[in-house]
Image: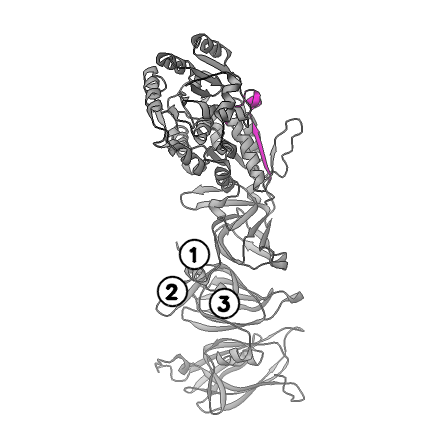
Amino acid sequence: MTDLAITYATYPTAFETPGGGEIQILQYRKHLAALGVDVTFFDPWKPSLGGVDVFHYFSCYRGSEIFIDELYRRGMSIILSPTLWIEEGATGYPMAQIGQMLSMAARIVCNSDMECDLLAGTFSVPRHKFATVYNGVDLSFMRPTDPEVFRSFSGVRGDFVLNVANVEPRKNQLRLIEAVKRLGMKLVMIGGVRDQGYFEQCMELGRGCLTYIPALPHDSDVLRSAYAACSIFALPSTLETPGLAALEAACVGARVLVTEVGCTQEYFQTSAVYVAPMSVDSIVEGLRRGLARPDSDAARDLVREKFTWPVVVERLLDVYLNRDVFGHALSARGFYLSAFDPLLGRYVWSKRVAGIVCDRSGFLKFDWCSPQRSKVAVKVNGELVWPDLEVGTDFSSMVLAAPLGPGEQRPQVEFEVQPLEREQSSADPRSLGVMLRDVRFLTGEEEMRAAGMLFELMGLQGQGWFRAEEDGVGPFIWSQKKAALICEQSGVLVFDWCAPQRSKVAVKVNGEFVWPDLEVGTEFSSMVLAAPLGPGEQRPRVEFEVQPLELEQASGDPRSLGVMLREVRFLTGEEEMRAAGMLFELLGLQGQGWHRAEEDGSGLFVWSRRRAALLCDLSGLLSFDWRAAQPSRVSVVVDGVLLWSELEVGTEWSHASIRLHPATPGGRSQIVFEVTPVDSVVRCADPRELGLALRGLAIKDKEQQVLQ
């Protein structure tokens, strides 16, 4: 079941003498309803276009372009079924108006690949706008049928040729009558009259061999019996795409003769006889060959397998649901019809509010952008996961975990878009949404690894990251200038990182600046971030914003403006943290620029790089022992104030302490260490030999009680 709102319309007089095209409309609606899709017929006396997801218009009959233009101006998603076979240079058609209609349609649904190719070439319309949905037959034509029902109804006995079609020049009944007369056979014509003068010519020419029966209801037992009773079904039209009646006749089991003009051979392949419609001799010869054929099940089996309405309507639903973007595991609502660009591939625009339902738990991965900078609120199963995610005009990658909802309900992802700039008046409502491309739904670890989903394999969700890569050291991932991570629970995020050029990185945790201007260089350094639950027990959220320190160089690779992460881990327990050498985090501190903690007979200790920092949430006295690998001078800055300038630290352990006073209640103190070896000539293979070692860390209050 889907809440997709679809409206159908065609030109006003189409159902005056309904033919295959009109039957197609009714059958589409009937079989879509069986799939849980409600189709509304447009009522010009009570027009209701608000909330319509797809407007499907049938035919390119003259005058239709005025109505389609009105739909287009309203920004509606238009699908057009032209049912045309027009070759370049054709006359008698409103070519300009047809071209206009084809250009305004978001998607064009044709009855065959051949029709798609022909119209795309004739009217210079991009081929990717077209989709093939084959014509079909009702399942009732598969039921066993008694030929005697028709014979009793019509009084026609013996062999006869059957033609079921509206009587008009395109159906070519005059030449068929002449061919039948040459063979001395009888002809039965069933159908409405679309051209009275042509009908009268047929009746005059067919005296003595022609039986005419007005159109029968499509579900009539008599019609099915006529197909079963005939010696051969003949539809030598001037063109067909492919002729619904021919499919029905084949489905019942009749021999079939059809025109060679149009897409008939794409349907019937070798199971029908093809004739040149403008040649009576060709029709005569075709009838002879068809009548001489032994009874064959080939045409019947082909039609029953590939061309029944339940089968072909599934493909139509694929077009309505943008399955060329979302696939079959996802059901989307609130999106316009997909489009294609040679550079972007297949993509789809959302409305301001849109949603995706997944058929099972997994991960939703896509690239997206907005026509203007926008904030997007993202909910998963009703829970606000990203309340104000910024989406820019350049594509960024997004991954969303989609677990089952309450009561094992299918995962639901919702988007609500709010442009950041003052909204401009636009005739195109897509300017208020977001564009999605490269949408994938992944459920297995192998799929996720192959898709470069580094974070999701450890239970994190990322936004603004490129696909993970791998080198001889292991997997790594590049950020964009802005990126974020959501953790499933509270814990500690550990990683090594670097930048392609010296950069400042602002780091927020749960919306609060933790490191407002952290310097990241071109060499890897270690980083640890505490990720507690946010307000209202919301999942932890970590955000990065990168600002290169040098003048930005023009680069074709946007990764040059971000940071690279590797050795990413998310730790939740004390044992995990101790095993990972996380000395500071065990004490409730956060460190940047420190190596992994080590242990000797005296306990845990940790080496700094030449520049390192600590964050502390508490007031009190931070005490520690420290030493350097070689005699060094150390400058210490606390909350932006220089505490010690070039303090000498030797190679033996000594004690030090620092008084911490966060600037604001509930704030953090930041301590920055900068180490300069006294002997600057010394070259060290081990970067720890250029830093400090700390151990015995403790924080005490003014009564000397240990706080942590």
Pick the residue in front: 667 or 40. 40
Q: Amino acid at mark 2?
A: Glu
Please report contact status of discs 3 and 1: CB closer than 8 Å, yes or no.
no
Which mark's residue is nearer the viewer, 3 or 2? 3
Secondary structure at numbered mark 2 = strand
Pick the residue in front: 188 or 194. 188
Q: Residues within 10 Å of mark 1 (few under 14, many from 20)?
A: some
- Which residue occupies 58% across, 78% down? 588
- Which residue occupies 47% across, 12% down? 198
Please report contact status of discs 3 and 2: CB closer than 8 Å, yes or no.
no
The quadrant where residue 550 appears: bottom left
Query: Along the horizontal axis of the image, is 184 left or right of 55?
Result: left
Compared with 621, 27 (above or below) is above
Percent position of residue 184, x then y: 37, 12
Q: Amino acid at mark 3?
A: Met
**Quadrant into which the C terminus falls:** bottom right
- For label 3, the residue is 458
Percent position of residue 330, x then y: 52, 50
Q: Which mark, by number, is residue 470?
A: 2
**Quadrant into which the N terminus falls:** top right
Which mark's residue is nearer the viewer, 3 or 1? 3
Work out how far the residue at label 3 is from the one at label 2, CA to CA, in angstroms: 16 Å
Pick the residue in front: 620 or 204. 204
- For label 1, the residue is 558
Q: Which residues are magenta?
A: 5-20
Q: Residues within 10 Å of mark 3 (few under 14, many from 20)?
A: some
Q: Residues within 10 Å of mark 2 (few under 14, many from 20)?
A: few
Work out how far the residue at label 1 is from the one at label 2, CA to CA, in angstroms: 18 Å
Q: Amino acid at mark 1?
A: Pro
Work out how far the residue at label 3 is from the one at label 1, CA to CA, in angstroms: 25 Å
